[in-house]
């Protein structure tokens, strides 16, 4: 007796395609385990991060692609109910969606890698969002085209609708293009410490679709519309060279030996220069006497910090050490002194 005598005819038509699909899944697992895993291990042995991004993106979908490929073969060799063309279109749609996800992961991953060494490729929320929108929009258009839907009228309708939407969302689009302008002009980037003309200052957390978020040193988050931020005056403490000068003013008594004062102050400064990591080693501390003040002779000691915020550590350490050293060397830091002349008038 044949197999058809024991199994209903409706089930027989599914045996061959299901077997083919199962074989595809098995081959996909084998391919992933041996070949893709081997490529991953080889990529981890070098310092180039881009190949890791590509291999990881493919690794997540390779079994699914085998499933789709063998599903296409199974449908072509089987007599399934309904039009065969419909099954192929559905498979093509899933393939396009998976390719869109893979392309998105690769492009965003490469953007993250390249942005670490190339500041002209900012890896921010706004650029990631635009990249995803472009990739998945193309994917949707390809799917519509595969189902025989003409996309030309759709593109025309989107153009007319886009004009109406742009008028309705004028402020939103203004913020969007303001954010793009900020990133392309490089006035500020993620991680920069900036000060705005309205007094706000902090670290740039993210340049988003509508708002740029700035984290203050007190850990408060400020959200500023991109259109406002792009038109404001800002000071960037981190762009180009993040190091900056740290001046510290000190006053000593008029009775002091200024050569001795300079020698002691430089000894303390050089000790900090050698032992404090936040001090830039490309700039040696220097002393400059500046003025004859009311109660003291004032001078400045100049350090150079590596990043904004380092001045707090430098100031704290130097003032404590110098105060202790001045006491040991009998160098006087005078209190403000004023001479009052009191005249008594004798009345007859």
Image (spheres, rainbow, N blue to C red):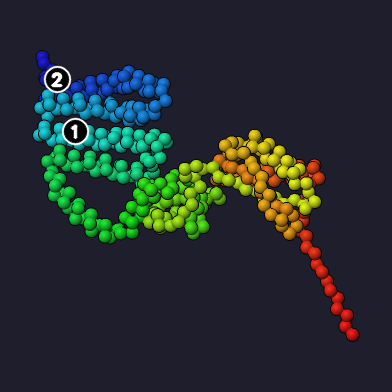
For the N terminus, the image quarter is top left
Q: CA distance from mark 1 to mark 2?
A: 32 Å
Instruction: For label 2, count other residues whose C-alpha is less than 10 Å away and answer few (under 14), some (14-19) or many (20+).
Output: few
N-terminal label among 1 and 2 = 2
Residue 63 in the image, given as x and y percentages of width and height: 28, 26
Q: Is residue 278 visible?
A: no
Give the side of residue 208 with respect to residue 300, left or right.
left
Quarter holding residue 328:
top right
In the image, residue 48 sits, relative to residue 252, either above or below, namely: above
Task: Residue 48: give x, y in percent of width and height.
Answer: 39, 27
> Which residue position is annotated with label 1?
91
The crowding category of the residue bearing disc 1, from other C-alpha atoms within 10 Å (few below 14, some 14 to 19, many at least 20), is some
Using residue 337 as the reference point, say whether residue 2 is left or right of it: left
Residue 141 percent location from the top left of the image: 19, 42
Q: What residue is shown with label 2?
A: 6
Q: Kindly give the residue lying farthest to the right in the view shown.
A: 348
Q: Residue furthest bottom?
A: 348
Tell me if residue 38 comes above or below residue 250 in the rendering. Answer: above
| Position of residue 342 measured from the top left corner of the image (x, y, whole percent) | 83, 71
Residue located at (78% from left, 49% from top): 256
Task: Answer with the quarter of the image where residue 337 lies.
Answer: bottom right
Check the image and name the residue furthest to the top.
1
Q: Which mark is residue 132?
A: none
């Amino acid at each position: 007796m044949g197999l058809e005598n024991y199994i209903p005819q409706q089930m027989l038509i599914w045996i061959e395609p299901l077997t083919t699909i199962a074989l595809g899944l098995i081959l996909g697992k084998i391919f992933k385990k041996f070949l893709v895993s081997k490529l991953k291990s080889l990529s981890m042995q070098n310092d180039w991060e881009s190949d890791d991004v590509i291999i990881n993106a493919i690794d997540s979908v390779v079994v699914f692609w085998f499933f789709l490929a063998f599903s296409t073969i199974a449908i072509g060799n089987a007599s399934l109910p309904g039009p065969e063309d419909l099954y192929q279109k559905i498979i093509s749609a899933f393939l396009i969606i998976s390719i869109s996800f893979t392309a998105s992961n690769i492009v965003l991953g490469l953007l993250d890698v390249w942005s670490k060494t190339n500041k002209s490729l900012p890896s921010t929320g706004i650029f990631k969002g635009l990249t995803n929108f472009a990739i998945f929009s193309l994917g949707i258009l390809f799917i519509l085209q595969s189902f025989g839907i003409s996309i030309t009228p759709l593109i025309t309708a989107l153009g007319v609708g886009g004009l109406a939407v742009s008028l309705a969302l004028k402020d939103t689009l203004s913020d969007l293009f303001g954010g793009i302008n900020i990133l392309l002009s490089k006035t500020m980037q993620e991680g920069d410490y900036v000060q705005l003309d309205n007094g706000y200052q902090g670290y740039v957390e993210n340049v988003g679709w509508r708002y740029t978020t700035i984290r203050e040193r007190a850990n408060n988050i400020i959200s500023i519309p991109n259109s406002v931020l792009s038109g404001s005056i800002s000071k960037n403490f981190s762009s180009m060279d993040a190091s900056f000068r740290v001046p510290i003013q000190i006053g000593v008594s008029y009775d002091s030996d200024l050569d001795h004062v300079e020698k002691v102050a430089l000894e303390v400064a050089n000790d900090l220069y050698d032992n404090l990591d936040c001090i830039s080693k490309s700039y040696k501390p220097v002393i400059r006497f500046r003025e004859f003040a009311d109660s003291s002779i004032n001078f400045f000691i100049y350090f150079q910090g590596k990043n904004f915020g380092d001045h707090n550590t430098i100031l704290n350490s130097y003032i404590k050490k110098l105060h202790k050293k001045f006491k040991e060397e009998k160098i006087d830091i005078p209190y403000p002194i004023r001479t009052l002349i009191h005249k008594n008038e004798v009345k007859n």
